[in-house]
Amino acid sequence: MQNTPAMGKVTSAIPGTSPTFLIKVVYAENFSIQGYIRWIEEGKSVPFRSYMEMLHLIQEGLYHSRHETGRLRSWDLGEEDVENGKGHSGAL
């Protein structure tokens, strides 16, 4: 990893690696959490207010980091693609 001065952007020395997230839980009660998530490679930190919001931030980071190599699976398969056999391998 390379780090630029003054807490600048951190870039991965190995292309194609998954992003790294640091999660700090500040408050947890009744199956809910609040805290901060830091995307190490981008040098960004964002507060989250629930598990769902934290998972959304991780998913968004994964999508952005893999945007050049291919899209993650999504619900946006057209119905015509499924009917024509595209997008479904038949095996789970």
Image (cartoon, rainbow, N blue to C red):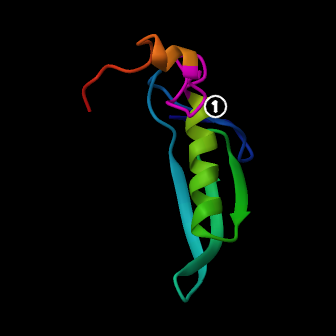
x, y (%) of residue 36? Answer: 65, 66
Q: In terms of image quadrants, where is residue 49? A: bottom right
Q: Which residue was labeled with disc 1?
A: 64
Classify mark 1: residues with Cα within 10 Å, few (<14), some (14-19) or many (20+).
Answer: few
Vertical position of residue 81 compared to residue 5: above or below: above
Q: Nearer the viewer, residue 71 or 24?
A: 71
Q: Nearer the viewer, residue 5 or 49?
A: 49
x, y (%) of residue 3? Answer: 61, 38
The residue positioned 61% from the left and 28% from the top of the image is 76
**Residue 73 shown in magenta:** yes
The residue positioned 48% from the left and 26% from the top of the image is 13
* Residue 30 located left or right of residue 7: left
Vertical position of residue 48 compared to residue 71: above or below: below
x, y (%) of residue 22? Answer: 54, 57
In this view, the residue farthest toward the left is 91
Looking at the figure, which quarter contains the C terminus?
Answer: top left
* Residue 87 located left or right of residue 55: left
Q: Of the residues shown, which amino acid type is indicated by label 1?
A: His
> Main SS type for the magenta part?
loop
**SS of the residue under disc 1:** helix
**Residue 65 shown in magenta:** no
The residue positioned 54% from the left and 89% from the top of the image is 30
Q: Nearer the viewer, residue 82 or 37?
A: 82
* Residue 83 located left or right of residue 91: right
Vertical position of residue 84 compared to residue 82: above or below: above
Q: What is the magenta range? A: 66-79
